[in-house]
Amino acid sequence: MINKVVICGVDTAGLPKLTAKEMDELMRRLKAGDSEAREKFIVGNMRLVLSLVKRFWAKNANADDVFQAGCVGLIKAIDNFDLGFNVKFSTYAVPMILGEIKRYLRDGNSLRVSRSIRDTAYKILKVREGIEEKDEVATIEKIAEVMQVKEREVVYALDAISDPVSLYEPVYNKSGDTLELLDQLYDETQSDEIWTERVALREAIGRLADRERKILMLRYYEGKTQTEISAEVGISQAQVSRLEKNALAAVKKEIM
């Protein structure tokens, strides 16, 4: 996306710049139904869209699609803008353009989130904003209390709309030595110590007699009872119990 000049067939380097006076005049004309003024106004504000699109370059999204989503937000802002608003058009348009871009990026995410959860998350964000406007700390507990929902529902909804993080996301960089998120992950089931124990266990079981080894495999890998094993192997349940006990003792002696 970076350094892209032509987006959606538009040469962004050649986009016109409108003065505040020209903007006001075109807005009055387009609100009166002038289609030519509407087109000029849209093109004249594409620089605004472009400036906001640049914020999302790190998302690695398609530049054309993000710019197009921003233009949709621009058009919605134009259609909903009222000349009676005591604000500049750009002030009014920026949140709508950003909202449309974020919606595109969210909906295009491979991790699909249900509509109901997204709606809950947006209500939570609104409540949080209201709490913070009162100069209060918007804790999970406080938000849940205001919304009259369980705290875990607040946490779940907010987590659901959070952007996924790449395992290769840099978390530390000094003197060219980059530490990635992947470097911080640790699987306790795959440590060197456990791996060594597994090798020793496999070798110890391999040294058992065929019948003892089969009993252990049926008992601990397939989860069968001693009675089921006795029927399959063709010996009594008491013999299975004795052979299992001896096999376990032999394995323990090997790996200890």
Image (tube, rainbow, N blue to C red):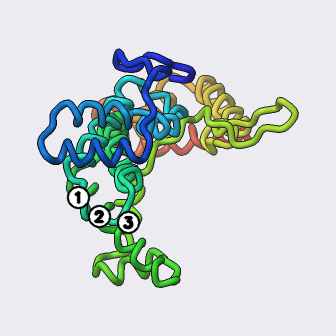
What residue is drawn where x is 55% and y is 34%? 58
Examine the rendering and report whether any part of residue 226 can be seen. no
In the image, 66 versus 225, the foreground residue is 66
Left or right placement of residue 1 versus residue 96 in this view: right
Question: Residue 212: percent from the left, percent from the top?
Answer: 50, 31
In the image, 156 versus 61, the foreground residue is 61
Q: Is residue 106 above or below residue 139?
A: above
Image depth: mark 2 or mark 3 in front: 2
CA gap, disc 2 and disc 1: 5 Å
Q: Amino acid at mark 2?
A: Phe
Q: Amino acid at mark 3?
A: Leu
Disc 3 packing (10 Å; few <14; some 14–19; many ≥20): some
In the image, 100 versus 27, the foreground residue is 27
- Which residue is labeled 2 in the image? 85
Disc 2 packing (10 Å; few <14; some 14–19; many ≥20): few
- Which residue is labeled 3 in the image? 125
What residue is drawn where x is 28% and y is 81%? 148
Q: Which mark is residue 103?
A: none
- Which residue is labeled 1 in the image? 82
Question: Residue 123: percent from the left, percent from the top?
Answer: 29, 67
Question: Residue 228: percent from the left, percent from the top?
Answer: 29, 39
Examine the rendering and report whether any part of residue 231 can be seen. yes
CA gap, disc 1 and disc 3: 26 Å
CA gap, disc 2 and disc 3: 25 Å
Disc 1 packing (10 Å; few <14; some 14–19; many ≥20): some
Mark closest to the chain's N terminus, 2 or 3: 2
Q: Amino acid at mark 1?
A: Asp
Q: Are marks 2 and 1 in contact (CB under 8 Å)?
A: yes
Left or right placement of residue 201 versus residue 85 in this view: right
Mark closest to the chain's N terminus, 1 or 3: 1
